[in-house]
Image: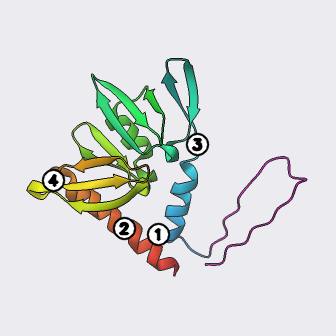
Amino acid sequence: MKIQYWKDPSLEEDHIDVHYRQETETIDVIREFFSSFNSIMGKKEDGMHKIHPGSIYYLEVVDRKLFAYQEKEVYQLDYSLRNYLELFGTNGFVQIGKSMAVNIYKVNRLKADLNMRLRLQMDNGEVLILNRNYKKAFLEMLKHIKEVCYENN
């Protein structure tokens, strides 16, 4: 796959064109990646903020409210966990527990834990526990992403 970059200060808006011969898993991943730049609204004490799903490290349900954790910020979202995963699951989000989901693109390292669980170290240093009931789906998504990455090489 060939990638080219052009800088043009006369453009009114940045844009990206993707040219391809046929639909492949790589093209699907590229499409999903760019769709993650669609913004959603998150609440904080000082009001509503526009955030991008791709910037979210993980999601957690606390007291029936969904919270999105970015590198250093936390926002409340007006979604249920299930609804969020239906809308944005193709952007790398996968459930890792009954009340938690992770952006697989923000996972830095995996480490085995007790009772067949996994410890997920995030890019921001936080550590999350992958419940063994959700391990298969997580590893399948990881395998899919890895295969697509190798397809590019």
Q: How many marks?
A: 4
Return the residue at label 2. Answer: 144
Q: Secondary structure at mark 3?
A: loop
Coordinates of residue 14 in the picture (x, y in percent) = 76, 51
Q: How is the image coloured?
A: rainbow
Q: Which numbered disc, 1 or 4, marks the residue that appears first in the sequence?
A: 1
Q: In the figure, is residue 36 to the left or right of 80?
A: right
Seen from the viewer's position, the closer of residues 145 and 110 is: 110
Q: Quadrant of residue 17?
A: bottom right
Return the residue at label 4. Answer: 132
Q: Is residue 8 above or below residue 97?
A: below
Answer yes or no: do the residues labelled 1 and 2 have beta carbons within 8 Å?
Answer: yes
Q: CA distance from mark 1 to mark 3?
A: 21 Å
Classify 10 Å Cα crowding around label 2: few (below 14), some (14-19), many (20 and above): few
- Which residue is found at the position 51% from the left and 82% from the top? 153
Coordinates of residue 147 in the picture (x, y in percent) = 40, 74
Q: Which numbered disc, 2 or 3, marks the residue that appears first in the sequence?
A: 3
Q: What kind of residue is marked 3?
A: Asn
Coordinates of residue 116 in the picture (x, y in percent) = 12, 58
